[in-house]
Image: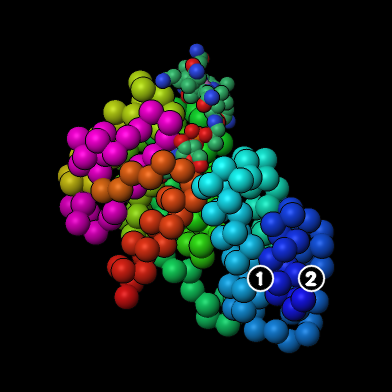
Amino acid sequence: MSILNEISTNLQQGKAKVVKELVQKAIDDGIDVKAILDEGLLAGMSVIGEKFKNNEVYVPDVLIAARAMNAGAELLKPLLASSGVKAIGKVVLGTVKGDLHDIGKNLVRMMMEGKGLEVIDVGIDVSSEKFINTAKETGAQIIACSALLTTTMGEIKHVVEAAKAAGIRDQVTIMIGGAPVTDSFCKQVEADIYTPDAASAADEAARVCKEKCA
Ligand code: B1M
């Protein structure tokens, strides 16, 4: 098995220490850092994402795999920066105002990072102003809102309105999700994309960024 396959396989098994050692070995062997990222770490995370979507693995498996990915990615970060490898796009991600649930949001972040996106995680209880200001400051292509409560999902409408008021509605794609959120709610509040799970959110975000940055 090639070292890149080994990285992918061990990442899927959540073996952070082994992944870190293998990534270091791959770097020492002179393997291209982009290949280590794409064919090792991101390939492994993509398998986990698919399995999670199909209910073949569960939340703890994803969290453990993500920890392994982060362990390897930490070693690559400085090398990627110096070799000029750029993220495929930027996403401002947060849980809406009044809502403190962050487990789903964190999964979305991990899956998005696993697709090579830069995620600016603005946390929980995030006001529409904060979403918009952060998107403006960072030039993000996507604002991604998570809402877990029927009492807070209406906040998404405020984010859409605030994007219009700030004159950036045409520039940002607004993605939404969370247990009570549906596709028809997405249309009702004039957001752009609803996805039911973290892996689909990452797939859609990557697709949007590739289209926008093409
Ligand atoms: Co809360 N809570 N909670 N809670 N809590 C729920 C959501 C609830 C359904 C429980 C219930 O009554 N059965 C209920 C909501 C009812 C409703 O509104 N319909 C509820 C309630 C009522 C409350 C409080 C009001 C309770 C109280 O204080 N009386 C309170 C509210 C606090 C607040 O936010 N202001 C509260 C508090 C809490 C805790 C703090 C104790 C804790 C949160 C801890 C944390 O997140 N750090 C908590 C928890 C853990 C839950 C449950 C048990 C689990 C939520 C979770 O993390 N699920 C939940 C019941 C349940 O779901 N079984 C519940 C796992 C997570 C992976 O799923 O976040 O849905 P989820 O994410 C999914 C998808 O939704 C999607 O991807 C993930 C899967 O891949 N997704 C996106 C999420 N965001 C996305 C964004 C996207 C795309 C997909 O694009 C941008």
Most distant residue in the bottom direction: 30
Marking on residue 22: 2
Which residue occupies the foreground of this view, 9 or 214? 9
Q: Residues within 10 Å of mark 2 (few under 14, many from 20)?
A: many
Which residue occupies the foreground of this view, 102 or 38? 38
Pointer 1 and pointer 2: residues touching (CB < 8 Å)?
yes
Amino acid on which the number 1 mark rests in the picture = Gly
**Does the segment drawn in magenta span residue 134?**
no
Q: Residues within 10 Å of mark 1 (few under 14, many from 20)?
A: many
Q: Residue at x 49, y 73 (%)?
A: 86
Marking on residue 150: none
Q: Residue at x 20, y 35 (%)?
A: 188
- Figure quadrant of the C terminus: bottom left
Span of residues in magenta: 167-191
Label 2: element kind: helix
> What residue is shown with label 1?
40
Residue 163 in view in this figure:
yes
